[in-house]
């Protein structure tokens, strides 16, 4: 009897739209992240209005291999930042982006690339972000867009936007996590010598006066200490004691340094740990809840539902490796946006993290 073999999944097609005077770092981010994923589940194409040479904002040129037809054929379209960001874009570029959105493709912007998505009407009625320096301009120029300058990125399901430069790494790693699971995203992050999650939002990067006694103070050692003890009861007074601070002072410093509260940060860290355990072990849900410090299985399920829009069981079913450890885990050809439930694409049981600072929506404390 002839043994049947499974047909490998087609690579997920990613088109990076390189506009004139593209910001080189923004351009390099998606290329570097997606080619670092094991098993080559992504097929990357650099495209412009036409194939050929495209000038960058740094004065050198890059060569793209395709024109706007690549936007039409892609499953995910990434628009890196460009300068000047307030210029009018060609009508054919805006039409290509709007057409991709209408066909249910995933649209992603890095930094000022959000201005292109907004000009195409894709961000109307949605939450979005961009570099904090340009957030007011985006809001003024496109009043139908709800601009949040505080976060590192916003995931609206089919449309995702990020803040400047390094936040593009955060967003691309989030896409890998959404498509292929936390373990793969963490593996990519390690290969890039990058944090799988960064704490907080853009607030930590906005220049502001510091009180004299805050110079040289960082809570990073306390956060690292907490990550090694997620299974233990961790309260603000206990964290403050480790940092040798009064609880109120600690809480205020924590928000100033990370852009989020200690309890929100702890919840995000515990959920990320739970996701890794669901992917990499056969532990029962009650044991995972205990190891992550979330207490009971019902509490774990509650936070999974509120924050990720799924259940631990559904998450494990979507991201558990197959029996063959050498088999590739590829995102399918087309992402299932919120308007197309059940469509083919990355198996993503997680709901959009609408106002995200570290890959998950902030839940109430």
Image: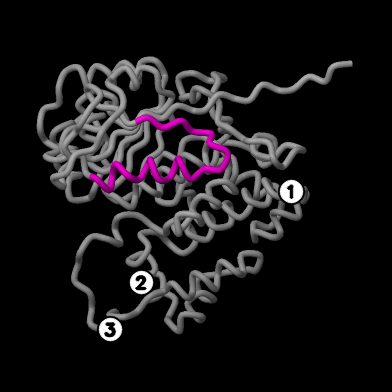
Q: Quadrant of residue 315?
A: top right
- Residue holding disc 2: 253
Q: As rendered, which of 302 and 200 lies closer to the eye? A: 200
Could you tell whether 336 is left or right of 45 in the image?
A: right
Instruction: Give the x, y percent position of residue 237.
Output: 51, 75
Region in magenta: 24-45
* Way the structure is coloured: one colour
Q: SS at mark 2?
A: helix
- Residue holding disc 1: 285
Instruction: Give the x, y percent position of residue 351.
Output: 51, 35
Q: As rendered, which of 214 and 363 lies closer to the eye? A: 214
Instruction: In the rendered structure, find residue 74 and report the number of the disc placed on it.
Output: none
Gap in angstroms between the C-alphas marked 1 and 3:
45 Å
Instruction: In the rendered structure, find residue 213 and report the number of the disc placed on it.
Output: 3
Q: Does residue 191 sit above or below 255 in this rendering?
A: above
Gap in angstroms between the C-alphas marked 2 and 1:
34 Å
Q: Examine the rendering and report whether any part of residue 25 can be seen.
A: yes
Q: Residue at x 57, y 20 (%)?
A: 342
- The reply to whether the C-beta atoms of the residues labelled 3 and 2 are less than 8 Å apart is no
Label 3 vs 2, first from the N-terminus: 3
- The reply to whether the C-beta atoms of the residues labelled 2 and 1 are less than 8 Å apart is no
């Amino acid at each position: 009897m002839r043994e049947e073999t499974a047909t490998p999944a087609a690579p997920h097609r990613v088109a990076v739209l390189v506009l004139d005077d593209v910001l080189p770092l923004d351009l390099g981010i998606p290329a570097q992240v997606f080619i670092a994923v094991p098993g080559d589940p992504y097929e990357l194409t650099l495209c412009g209005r036409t194939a050929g040479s495209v000038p960058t904002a740094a004065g050198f040129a890059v060569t793209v291999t395709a024109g706007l037809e690549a936007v039409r054929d892609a499953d995910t379209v990434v628009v890196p930042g460009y300068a000047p960001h307030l210029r009018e874009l060609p009508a054919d570029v805006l039409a290509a982006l709007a057409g991709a959105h209408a066909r249910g493709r995933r649209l992603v912007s890095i930094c000022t690339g959000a201005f292109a998505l907004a000009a195409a009407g894709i961000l109307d009625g949605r939450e979005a972000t961009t570099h904090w320096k340009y957030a007011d301009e985006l809001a003024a120029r496109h009043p139908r867009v709800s601009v949040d300058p505080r976060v590192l990125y916003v995931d609206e399901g089919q449309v995702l936007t990020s803040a400047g430069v390094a936040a593009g790494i955060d967003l691309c790693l989030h896409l890998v996590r959404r498509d292929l699971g936390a373990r793969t995203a963490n593996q990519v992050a390690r290969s890039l010598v990058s944090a799988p999650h960064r704490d907080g939002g853009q607030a930590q990067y906005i220049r502001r006066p510091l009180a004299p006694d805050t110079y040289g103070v960082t809570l990073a050692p306390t956060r690292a200490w907490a990550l090694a003890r997620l299974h233990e009861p961790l309260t603000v007074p206990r964290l403050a004691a480790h940092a040798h601070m009064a609880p109120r002072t600690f809480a205020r410093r924590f928000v100033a340094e990370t852009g989020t509260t200690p309890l929100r940060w702890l919840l995000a860290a515990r959920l990320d740990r739970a996701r890794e355990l669901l992917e990499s072990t056969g532990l029962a849900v009650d044991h995972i809840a205990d190891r992550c410090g979330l207490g009971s299985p019902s509490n774990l399920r509650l936070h999974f539902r509120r924050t990720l829009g799924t259940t631990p069981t559904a998450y494990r079913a979507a991201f558990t490796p197959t029996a063959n450890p050498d088999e590739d885990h590829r995102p399918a050809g087309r992402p299932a946006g919120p308007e197309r439930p059940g469509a083919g694409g990355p198996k993503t049981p997680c709901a959009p993290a609408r106002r995200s600072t570290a890959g998950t929506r902030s839940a109430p404390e």
